Amino acid sequence: MLKEGDQAPDIQVHTDTGEAFRLSDLKGQRVVLYFYPKADTPGCTVEACEFRDDIKKFTKKGAAIVGVSPDKPTAQAKFKQKYDLPFTLLADEDKAAAHAYGVWKEKNMYGKKVMGIERTTFVIGPDGKIEKIYGKVKVKGHAAEVLGAL
């Protein structure tokens, strides 16, 4: 289980454009890495749009926003285009990033046990260490909460 102060796991996945992405390439800047269950679903859309709407404030604070879900790059690209999201979305199809960050968990959906992403946000410092973890995120107002902590 990761905790604040730990070195952030370096993940290698594909972006919404199909390009290779490596978290360590962002070393030297603050990163808001947020995991969400599925592109273009109601809660995930609210969360993404709140980050989008505050992007200039995050940029002023030197923070890059990066969203991660187990969707395919094509689904991420559609989601990004549909809502004009100005940040990178990662396609964690094999769930390696979710496992590395400990967010692939058993969930209870309508009385049924299923495996899925537990909505979680990690603020990673320029040194690559985890500064803050937001677990079991409630989407409404989350972006403002993260921004306030920066």
Image (cartoon, grey):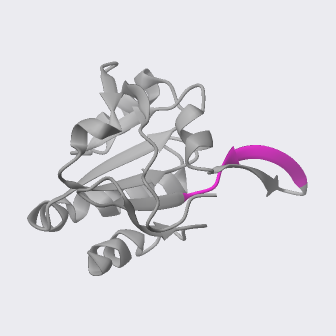
Report the front residue among 107 and 131: 131
Q: Measuring 33% from the left and 39% from the top, which residue is drawn there? A: 23
Q: Is residue 27 left or right of residue 132?
A: left
| In the image, residue 8 above or below residue 134 | above
| In the image, residue 146 above or below residue 70 | below
| In the image, residue 88 above or below residue 75 | below
User: What is the quadrant of the C terminus in the image?
Assistant: bottom left
Q: In the rendered image, which quarter is residue 107 located in? A: bottom right
Q: Residue furthest left?
A: 60
Q: Position of residue 51 (x, y in %)?
A: 30, 60
- Give the magenta-colored segment's residue range: 112-119
Residue 34 drawn in magenta: no
Q: Is residue 3 left or right of residue 62?
A: right
Residue 118 drawn in magenta: yes
- The number of callouts visible is 0
Report the front residue among 125 and 70: 125
Q: Measuring 43% from the left and 35% from the top, which residue is drawn there? A: 11
Answer yes or no: is residue 70 visible: no
Q: Measuring 19% from the left and 59% from the top, which residue is drawn there? A: 55
Q: Position of residue 88 (x, y in %)?
A: 29, 39
Answer yes or no: is residue 94 visible: yes
User: What is the quadrant of the N terminus in the image?
Assistant: bottom right
Q: Is residue 97 left or right of residue 50?
A: right
Report the front residue among 39 and 93: 93
Most prominent secondary structure in the magenta stretch?
Answer: strand
Q: Measuring 47% from the left and 60% from the top, which residue is drawn there? A: 6
Q: Position of residue 30 (x, y in %)?
A: 24, 58
Q: Position of residue 123 (x, y in %)?
A: 36, 62
